[in-house]
Amino acid sequence: GQQVMQIPQYQHVQEGEDFTTYCNSSTTLSNIQWYKQRPGGHPVFLIQLVKSGEVKKQKRLTFQFGEAKKNSSLHITATQTTDVGTYFCAGGGSARQLTFGSGTQLTVLP
Amino acid sequence: DAGVIQSPRHEVTEMGQEVTLRCKPISGHNSLFWYRQTMMRGLELLIYFNNNVPIDDSGMPEDRFSAKMPNASFSTLKIQPSEPRDSAVYFCASTPPGGGNEKLFFGSGTQLSVL
């Protein structure tokens, strides 16, 4: 079945530093979604990428979808303490099913 | 506008007891998903319904788990009998009608502890 790998598992950064998490799929994806889960909270949708090579930005967050539609990345510029949480990618396949990556837990040190 | 509503928020039970988790999806959403989250296995899809019909239950761990969706506004996930390894956060999520992978709206989850 479809597998989605996400690295790194953990990342500690100083406030103001940049952060990147990477997502790789064993198969070509129809789309990829990104979610953020705050500590003790539930996953919240951030964005969906559909097109090969697509790049989308949300303020300090930049999302990319690879040309082969098998990998994706999320980059945060100048992290803030409000960015703390776990970031998940989720690869879209058939039948409305998403396969979630294992997540990257981001800690931002003030 | 209410989001996905799950109850209870926390459940502590003893091994062997029956546990029922409840979910009310967002009004107008026609797909409902049950996920389980653990440190070891991450977010796992257990089952999903489309228009109240179970479409794929291949993620349900074993016969002790069952899920129902008697109508568009209510779903249950039942574990009988429960075991300590079932301890996890169980999330319900719903999506609006659409042709592809619509974004998931998650509930706040049920933290289940089986002693």
Image (spheres, rainbow, N blue to C red):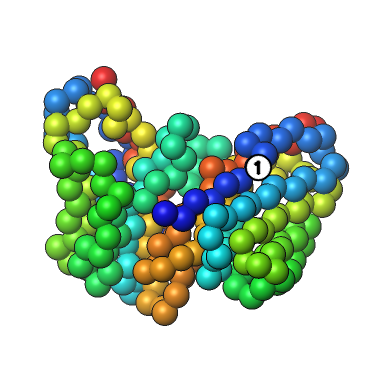
Position of residue B99 measured from the top left corner of the image (x, y, whole percent): 42, 79
Q: Is residue B108 something that shows in the picture?
A: yes
At x 26%, y 47%, the residue is B60
The quadrant where residue A108 appears: top right
The quadrant where residue A39 appears: top right
Which amino acid does the dot numbered 1 rest on?
Ile
Position of residue A15 measured from the top left corner of the image (x, y, whole percent): 82, 38
Q: Nearer the viewer, residue B5 or B48?
A: B48
Position of A13 relative to B16 (above/below): below
At x 44%, y 75%, the residue is B100
At x 55%, y 65%, the residue is A28
Q: Nearer the viewer, residue A64 or B50?
A: A64
At x 64%, y 75%, the residue is A51
Position of residue B111 measured from the top left corner of the image (x, y, whole percent): 36, 35
Q: Secondary structure at mark 1?
A: strand
| Extreme residue toward the top, this view | B115
Q: Nearer the viewer, residue B100 or B113?
A: B100
| Extreme residue toward the bottom, this view | B99
The subunit carrying tag 1 is A
Q: Which residue is mark 1?
A: A7
User: Is A22 displayed left or right of B2 in the figure?
Assistant: right
The quadrant where residue A19 appears: top right
Q: Is residue A46 something that shows in the picture?
A: no
Disc 1 crowd rating (10 Å Cα; few below 14, some 14-19, many 20+) is some
Position of A17 relative to A59 (above/below): above
Total number of numbered discs in the rendering: 1
Q: Which quadrant: the C terminus of chain B?
A: top left
User: Is A76 displayed left or right of A71 in the figure?
Assistant: right
Q: Which quadrant: the N terminus of chain B?
A: bottom left
Position of residue B93 measured from the top left corner of the image (x, y, whole percent): 38, 57
